[in-house]
Image: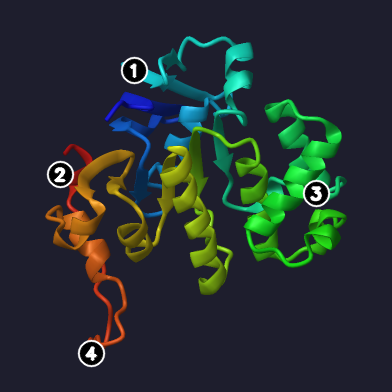
Amino acid sequence: MTALLEVEDLRVSFRTPTGPFHAVRGVSFALGRERLGIVGESGSGKSLTGRAIMRLLPASAQLSARRLAFDGTDLLTASPRTLRGLRGARISLVMQDPKYSLNPVMRVGEQIAEAARIHGGVSARDARRKALAMLEAVRIRDPERVYRLYPHEVSGGMGQRIMIAMMLVPEPDLLIADEPTSALDVTVQMQVLAILDDLVAQRGMGLIFISHDLDLVASFCDRVLVMYAGRVVEERAARDLAAATHPYTRGLLQSLPRIDDDRAELPTLSRDPAWLEG
């Protein structure tokens, strides 16, 4: 399988008064046209890894890697113009919270149409048509009405679906989805995952699916990376996640509630300092 994305020894650090803080430490993986899940606790470096791939880091961040390439393009040395041409059109990022991602003074349909127009090079009429079709694809009822709404007039779950529609309308080659279904109910969650699954299968899109939900990732993704304190501590085929061997991954799995669980309390992780060094 030809790698669409190559990440080798990715590192992100920040200067602090007490010295550098290493937020992402030596992350390496290759992504083909498949579904890769990244799981771990809050603060483990999942979202920062996704932003680093997009080169969307704050100015205070220090980014380095032995290799960071998308479809043959070196993202570390790419010019701002090259990066602008890739973002949105070929690499899209679905943010975790639509309240901070949607333009509050612009109708949601116009925002989706703008993405189609800028990244797809289509006319205003075709952009509107594609926007309505994508709203319908993410299972939004009455897309004509929703097209005219402002972000504050939609619910959190609908806002998340609108964000997904906006990122998918240019038909990217790589989608980085940061908790894309966290604000959705279970039924809509499955519908959105089906849409993403179709894009991977039919268009050959690569997907990085960032989540806290181990069960969801195990059932939806092809491979899983487990991150702890900025490092990848384990990589497994998703179908084999239940057989994980690293004590951190085992601890995450054991802390999940089960319907048939008769434990009075869920266990908590006993962390080993050795995990920080591998």
Q: For the residues carrying marks 1 and 4, which lies nearer the camera in this image?
A: 1
What amino acid does circle 1 point to? Arg
Does the CB distance between marks 1 and 3 fall below 8 Å?
Answer: no
Q: Earlier in the sequence, mark 1 or mark 3?
A: 1
Q: Earlier in the sequence, mark 1 or mark 2?
A: 1
Which quadrant does the C terminus fall into? Answer: top left
Task: Determine whether the residue tagged by mark 3 lies in a helix, strand or loop.
Answer: helix
Q: Residue at x 60, y 43 (%)?
A: 168
Q: CA distance from mark 3 to mark 2?
A: 50 Å
Q: Earlier in the sequence, mark 4 or mark 2?
A: 4
- Residue 225, by quadrant, is top left
Q: CA distance from mark 4 to mark 2?
A: 32 Å
What residue did someone put label 3 on?
109
Answer whether residue 270 is visible to the viewer in this image. Answer: no
Q: Residues within 10 Å of mark 4 (few under 14, many from 20)?
A: few
Q: CA distance from mark 1 to mark 2?
A: 27 Å
What amino acid does circle 4 point to? Asp
Q: Earlier in the sequence, mark 4 or mark 3?
A: 3
Q: Residue at x 51, y 72 (%)?
A: 186
Q: Is residue 72 left or right of residue 120?
A: left
Q: Compared with residue 254, is residue 170 higher up or lower down, i.e. above or below?
A: above
Q: For the residues carrying marks 4 and 3, which lies nearer the camera in this image?
A: 3
Give residue 199's position: percent from left, percent from top. 49, 46
What amino acid does circle 2 point to? Ala
Q: Earlier in the sequence, mark 3 or mark 2?
A: 3
What residue did someone put label 1 on?
67
What amino acid does circle 3 point to? Gly
What residue did someone put label 4 on?
262
Between residue 136 and residue 45, name the one nearer to us: 136
Q: For the residues carrying marks 1 and 2, which lies nearer the camera in this image?
A: 1
